[in-house]
Amino acid sequence: MAAFVFAVLLLMVTPGPGVLSTAGIGSGFGFRAGLAYVFGLWLGNNGVAIAVVSGLAALMLSIPWLRMLLLVASVAYLFYLAAKIAFSGSRIGFIHAERPPGMWGGLALQAINPKAYVVHTTLMSGFAFMPQNLPVEIGLKFLLMNLIWIPIHLAWLWAGVAVNRLDLPPHQQRAINIAMALAMLAVVGLAILNRPV
């Protein structure tokens, strides 16, 4: 179980679309708007985990045109987000929009988030610690993942709010934007390189 918890920490704390966009919502719209978005991400994250455990994700991804559609949608969204970050000038600007995306935005992002599918497939199919009682193991995995997922995303939300409150010089703000854009492009690259053939 300790190996599973450590794997969850490593896989969930690393930047992906969910945590990067959470920081962006915090930066652009504040903590309250960010909570609605994080709630949507949480619903979507657990929905992806259920789809993986039930085999629905494997069934959906076995349909070539649907798999390609999901890949194109996720890569296009991640490129869009990376461009918004990179070209936001010298302002700290992870995401700029008229209104926060809210719960539905978070839910929609997780549905097309390639990292979510990879993470849940890895965690649910590996790290067996109760092979004699698979339903209990899966239930414990859901519990442990959520006990780690929630504080990590709230921390990223707080970080986005905190960074926005800093009065950083323009060159430091630009460096943060470029680093965030490069992180998003790395996620895009991983999605493309690790797509099912």
Image: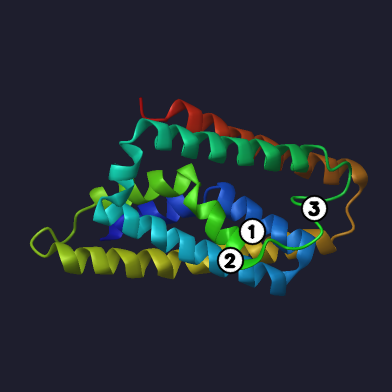
Q: Residues within 10 Å of mark 3 (few under 14, many from 20)?
A: some
Q: Nearer the viewer, residue 71 or 155?
A: 71
* Residue that badge 2 annotates: 38
Q: Are marks 2 and 1 in contact (CB under 8 Å)?
A: yes
Q: What type is the residue that disc 3 sits on? A: His
Figure quadrant of residue 158: bottom right
Figure quadrant of residue 177: top right
Q: What type is the residue that disc 2 sits on? A: Val
Q: What type is the residue that disc 1 sits on? A: Thr
Q: Pick the quarter of the image with the N terminus.
A: bottom left
Q: Position of residue 150 (x, y in %)?
A: 50, 68
Helix, strand or loop at disc 1? helix
Cα distance in 3D space between marks 3 and 2: 17 Å
* Residue that badge 1 annotates: 22
Residue at 67% x, 35% y: name it.
182
Helix, strand or loop at disc 2? helix
Residue at 38% x, 63% y: name it.
145
Q: Kindly identify which numbered label has been placed on residue 87.
A: none
Q: Is residue 104 above or below residue 110?
A: below
Residue at 41% x, 63% y: name it.
46
Cα distance in 3D space between marks 2 and 1: 7 Å
N-terminal label among 2 and 1 = 1
Q: Position of residue 103 (x, y in %)?
A: 60, 67
Do we see residue 54 in this rendering?
yes
Q: Residues within 10 Å of mark 2 (few under 14, many from 20)?
A: many
N-terminal label among 1 and 3 = 1
* Residue that badge 3 annotates: 96
N-terminal label among 3 and 2 = 2
Q: Position of residue 36 (x, y in %)?
A: 62, 71
